[in-house]
Amino acid sequence: MTDQRVAELVDELPDGVVVTDPDVVAAYRHDRAADPGAGTALAVVRPRRTEEVQAVLRWASAHGVPVVPRGMGTGLSGGATALDGGIVLSTEKMRDITVDPVTRTAVVQPGLLNAEVKKTVAEYDLWYPPDPSSYEICSIGGNIATNAGGLCCVKYGVTTDYVLGLQVVLADGTAVRLGGPRLKDVAGLSLTKLFVGSEGTLGVITEVTLKLLPPQKVASTVVASFNSVAAAADAVVEITGKIRPSMLEFMDAVAVNAVEDKLKMGLDRNAAAMMVAASDDRGAAGTEDAEYMARVFTEHGATEVFSTADPDEGEAFVAARRFAIPAVEAKGSLLLEDVGVPLPALADLVAGVEKLAAQHDVMISVIAHAGDGNTHPLIVFDPADADMAQRAQTAFGDIMDLAISLGGTITGEHGVGRLKRPWLAGQVGPDVMALNQRIKAALDPANILNPGAAF
C-alpha cells in the first residue's frame, strides 16, 4: 500500500522530484537540532514550482500522509524532524529571485540562502537586513518559518518586519497570495503575519515578497571586556535606554575562550564577558554613538575597550561572535537554547543560567543578542554519558522555566519545534493555547502539516 501511494505521487511530479533512495532519505531525518525522536520518511520531495507543492499536498490530504516542510535543515528546535510514514518536503530547489529597485522589493522563492539574497539585492544597491549568525547556510524559507532574527535586529528588526507578501499552499493544496509589494495595506486580517513564524504548521510558503532598504552605512565597532557579567548586562540596559545601536552582542567566558582556541585573535581569556557593539549612525550634536557606548562600557568597569572605524577590523570581531556556536560545539554535543527576557532581567537570566550549570554539573555557555534580550545558552554534554545527557536535558527545561519566571519567552527566533513544545503552554497559558489550536484546526483540519511541531 505504501509503495502504491508513493508510486502515485511519483507519477504526478516531474522526474527526480520524489526521492526514495534510503541513503538520501536518511540525510533528511532531522535538522541541526538532531532530535533523537526523528523518524524515517517514505520519501523526500524537492519541488521547484508552486504547482508541484500543490500536487504534493493534494496527494497527502487524500491519503492522510503527514508532510514536514524543510528548508536547509539548519533549524535548532527540531522543527524539521522527519516522521515515520510521512513526507519531507524540501524547498531547497526553489531558488528564483526577482528584484525591483523602484519599489525596493524582491520576490524570492524559499530555497535561496539568506546570504544569496543579500548578495543579489546588493547588485541593485539595496540591502536585506535580517542576518542570523547562520546567514551563509540558512534559507529564506526557514527564516520565515521561525521568524529569524540576527545580530543587527536590535536596530533593524526581524524577518517579519521585511515580509510584505507571501504565496502559501494550504493543507488541501489551495495556493493563496497574501499581501504584496505595498508598504501600507490593511485590507482584511493580517494573514501574512500569521504565517511568519508558523513553523510549517499552517501552510507551505512557496514565494515571498521582501522589503529592502538602502545600503547600511559603514559602522563603527566597539569591543569591551568585563570581569563581571552583571556589569556587562547593566551597560546594555543603559545603552539601549539612550540609543539604538546597530549591534549589541554578548559572549561569556566559555564562548570567548572557545573562539580564541580556534581563531587565535588575541581575545582576553580572563574576561568574564565580552561585548561586541556597533553603530552605523551619528548621535545628537555630532557625537558618535560608538563613542557613547565606549564611555558607558568604561563607566561600568570594562577592563579593556577597543574602538575602530575600520570596517575590516570591525568585521573580524563580528565574525568571532558569529563563530561562537561552532566553537563551543567543538567541545561536545550541544543543546541550544533560545530564551529571551525583557532587558532589565538580562543579568538575572545570565546569573540564573550560571547557577543551573553548577547545579547540574554541565558546561553552559551564554551568547546573546543582548540589545534585544535574546540569549542563546549552549549546553555542552557527552551523549555517550547517559547521566550527563539527562542532566543536560534537565538543565534545558530549567532554563526555559527560568526565562518564563522572568517574564520572558522560550524562543526568540529559533521556533518551538518539537524540542520546546512541552514548555509552550507554560508560557502562553491555556486560553492562548486553545486559540492556537483553533487556528491550526481551521487551516489544517486533518493535521497533516508538520504534526507534532509547536503544538
Image (spheres, rainbow, N blue to C red):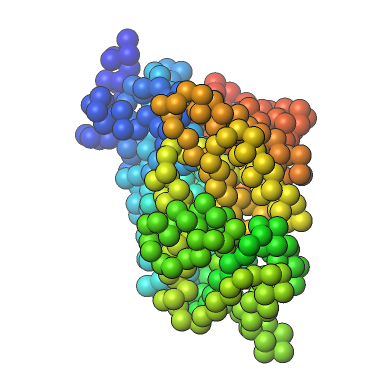
In depth, the one of 227 and 84 nearer the eye is 227
In depth, the one of 165 and 292 nearer the eye is 292
Left or right position of 451 against 73: right
Q: Considering only vertical position in the picture, is 264 above or below 29?
A: below
Left or right position of 368 against 406: left
Q: Can residue 406 be seen in this view?
A: yes
Left or right position of 349 against 176: right
What residue is shown at x 31% (from left), y 28% (from top)?
Answer: 26
In depth, the one of 268 and 221 nearer the eye is 268
Question: Outermost residue toward the bottom?
Answer: 286
What residue is shown at x 59% (from left), y 58% (from top)?
Answer: 272
- Residue 127, position in %: x, y? 48, 69
Q: Considering only vertical position in the picture, is 135 above or below 142?
A: below
Q: Considering only vertical position in the picture, is 19 above or below 42?
A: below
Picture quarter with the C terminus:
top right
What residue is shown at x 44% (from left), y 57% (from top)?
Answer: 259
- Residue 347, position in %: x, y? 71, 53
Picture quarter with the N terminus:
top left
Q: In which quarter of the image is residue 385?
A: top left
Left or right position of 343 against 453: right
- Residue 57, position in %: x, y? 43, 29
Total marks shown come to: 0
- Residue 88, position in %: x, y? 38, 30
Question: Outermost residue toward the top?
Answer: 1
What residue is shown at x 70% (from left), y 57% (from top)?
Answer: 230
Q: Is residue 135 visible?
A: no
